[in-house]
Amino acid sequence: MMDLKSLFICTLLGCLLCYINAQQDGNDCIKANAKSCGECIQVGANCGWCTEPDFLKQGEPTSARCDVLESLKKRCTEIENPRGDKTVLLNKPVTNRNHGTDERKPEDITQIQPQKMALTLRSGEPQTFELKFKRAEDYPIDLYYLMDLSFSMKDDLENVKNLGTNLMREMQDITSDFRIGFGSFVEKTVMPYISTTPAKLLNPCTGDQNCTSPFSYKNVLKLTNNGNQFNTLVGQQQISGNLDSPEGGFDAIMQVAVCGEHIGWRNVTRLLVFSTDAGFHFAGDGKLGGIVLPNDGKCHLENGMYTMSHYYDYPSIAHLVQKLSDNNIQTIFAVTEEFQPVYKELKNLIPKSAVGTLSSNSSNVIKLIIDAYNSLSSEVILENSKLPEGVTINYVSHCKNGLVNTGENGRKCSNISIGDEVMFNISITAHKCPKKGQDETIKIKPLGFTEEVEIKLKFICECECHDKGIPNSPKCNDGNGTFECGACRCNEGRIGRLCECSTEEVNSDDLDANCRRDNGTDICSTNGDCICGECVCKKRDNPNEIYSGKYCECDNFNCDRSNNMICGGNGECVCRVCKCSPNYTGSACDCSLNTSTCLAKNGQICNGRGNCECGTCKCTDPKFQGPTCEICPTCPGVCAEHKECVQCRTFGTGEKKDTCEADCSYFNLTKVNDRDKLPQPGQATALTHCKERDASDCWFYFTYGVNNTENDIHVHVVDVLECPTGPDIIPIVAGVVAGIVLIGLALLLIWKLLMIIHDRREFAKFEKEKMNAKWDTGENPIYKSAVTTVINPKYEGK
């Protein structure tokens, strides 16, 4: 018995796996193989669940209730399709504040709207809302000046001693509510960062320099609006010293960020000015001094001094970024020219931070701070808290001058002046339900600001019909499941569409036998899986293509096609046979019973020369062809066909003049005396205009028309022949003679012209040869003397 159970379970699991693997890439709703409405709506925002109890056809699985909405609406009227929404819970308008005249407390100033929202999220459906930011005028500022007091900053300390009153005076143009504080740092008080000899611990400087003992970080002055107090306390500070070049500034920044009560931070704009002329130590450097514990990111100030520098390592950059962001602190690095590249790289890692070039003695520190503040405050960057698993967020910013940014740039807007408003479109999308389905809360805020938007996220994990489910419903095989959303959700140990099957009662032999058609060998016609003794037909990627039937032997997509469409688009494929629409017949419903396409111009079907079959004329007379049997290539035309009868009845001439009465009485004849009086197109149906010539070469004109309603022929004819007149002989003869004479004269002139040209060429040739003669023109070149002189060669002249 146990072997049979094991075999059944393995077979069942195998069938299910085959069924799932059969769903190839395509319709995601179908591919999901959802067993309940809740599973279906998690697949995507375009999926719906049909709750009609009788929706499923024979052989269709429960998962067939889940389909894309567009397809489901064609087959189902009761569809579960919950949608998400958004609700604004707190929506205070942004503050319009005037410089120096508004006495509102900082916590009453609003720069971001709305402040609180609730979103209901369904998987795959984004919820979008607008967030408005307006930079308020005269917004309070807290500025904490953190200074490196190593020996190299000695001359800088002198210039900072009057910073309090001078900076407060300059900041009056920006805000009427300004506070300033001061802190200093050197280095961890262990080797090898400082010398631990007793003398060096008292005075780390060399020579006759009087320096204070080294320390890690000291909070000298809590934030105050008393500039004179700042000057007094800073003036009492002394330079210290250390051994290595990098300083322990990161320890100091961490304490300034997390020790809010000691520093005195308010919920206003928080600025931290970090002034140094050296680099920095970061996480891992503490190992040089035997410090291995990571920085815990907590406050350890006692009497203004950081007491755990020897115990905890330096913080990492990422840890520092997190704490600065959590506490809304904007950092200004005031560093010398030498270390500009290092701190610019650090700026790129710390959002809402700026770098300014500090002069060698810090004389330009006030201008540096104001410029850096204006740069930081002119840019707003949104950040969000950690998102729940499966939730994504997208930003689109609408900044000044119509500038729209998307992606990561959609989080920020730049060049914002006081009083400017910018908008952000924020879309939040859930891609799945949280494991426990609990509500979540996220926060969105501008970096460097304390204000934030709190968003409560609710997730749609089940359909509304889930709560109306009936446990142990009689519809589910006498209580073997919960009937919800139109389907049964089976209890443990039960399977089947109606939970009718128990894993302990059915074996694999029964399973196969019930799924074979006519005791054949194919299970479910190879188009489905045998589950719990019933065929569950496979689903196809195209939701409109369906297998059906007790043995999945039917489908609605393997019928005959016409024009590459199932049933020619004129019928429905039912179990592989076309059920044609009215006025269509044939195996592919491609034969139309409508005869309108066979009507000829004369109103007759196929011109009376054929039959209309499937909307096309089949001509009975083989010599006729064309869409309505109107063309006869071997037949004379209408005009030529009726020419002899029209001629004999009108003029008493022609070949049929002797048999005219017998052969030509099939039409009505009307005579007119002018061509303009003949019927024109539009005045009579099926009208043909004719022009024919008789044996005497005279033309006559007539029209041939057929009356569709009475089916009679009417001919209108012009009773006057149009005969050609004889030619006028005298002008013709005169013209011929004149032409011959003119042609002769023209030929003589041409001959004379050619002779003149020829003579001139010959004369020119003669003149040229005459000029080229080589003999003297005074002698005859052919003359020879008659006297011959002979000389004796032996004559010596004696």
Image: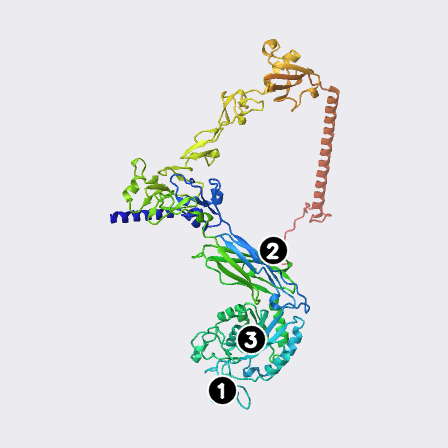
Determine contact: label 2, label 1, CB under 8 Å.
no
Q: Is residue 138 above or below residue 13?
A: below
The residue carrying mark 2 is 793
Please, what is the three-letter code of the amino acid marked with disc 1? Leu
Question: Foreground residue, 729 or 365?
Answer: 365
The residue carrying mark 3 is 263
Question: Foreground residue, 721 or 261?
Answer: 261
The residue carrying mark 1 is 201
Q: Is residue 760 above or below residue 294?
A: above
Q: Earlier in the sequence, mark 2 or mark 1?
A: 1
Image location of residue 216, percent across then percent down: 50, 80
Please, what is the three-letter code of the amino acid marked with disc 3? Ile
Q: Earlier in the sequence, mark 1 or mark 3?
A: 1
Q: Is residue 500 above or below residue 625?
A: below
Q: Is residue 702 above or below residue 585?
A: above
Q: Residue at x 67, y 76 (%)?
A: 169
Please, what is the three-letter code of the amino acid marked with disc 2? Pro
